[in-house]
Amino acid sequence: MGKGTAEALCSIIQSYTIKSTFYILTKLIRCPQCGAGIVAGKSKSANKTYRYYKCGTFHNKGASECSANSINADKAERQVLEEFKRIVTESQFLQRLIYQF
Ligand SMILES: [Zn+2]
């Protein structure tokens, strides 16, 4: 992956995360319990709207089949973004190292 591509990808993910309209993780993570895809949801409390991800099996078939295993969408996306940045940074670091030899 070239430097430009990595930076472009990073900014795309960042802008989606900031806008909070696109649930990037539905494509990336699965339920740790049953392995099903996860679904995104919203819940309102007081004056805030929370976004979350939960198990698709739980969503479709109920608590008898699996647990919600829900996670906070903002928190999870931030973690993935940080991890992604780290990988990009490290791969650039490795590239620079390689060019020196
Ligand atoms: Zn599940």
Image (cartoon, rainbow, N blue to C red):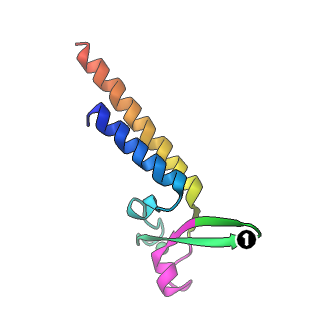
Quadrant in which the N terminus is drawn: top left
Q: Position of residue 65 (x, y in %)?
A: 50, 83
Identified at 73% across, 71% down, the residue is: 45
Question: Hey, which residue is sitting farthest right in the picture?
Answer: 46
Where on the picture, by quarter, is residue 98? top left
Looking at the picture, does residue 76 appear above or below residue 6? below
Few, some or many residues within 10 Å of mark 1 (<14, 14–19, 20+) = few
- Left or right for 19, reference 88: right
Magenta stretch in the rendered image = 52-68
Question: Is residue 54 part of the magenta span, yes or no?
Answer: yes
Q: Residue at x 46, y 79 (%)?
A: 57
Read off the residue under disc 1. Answer: 45
Q: Position of residue 13 (x, y in %)?
A: 43, 49
Secondary element type, mark 1: strand
Residue 16 or residue 69, whichever sits in front:
16
Examine the rendered structure and indicate whether residue 52 appears above or below residue 84. Answer: below
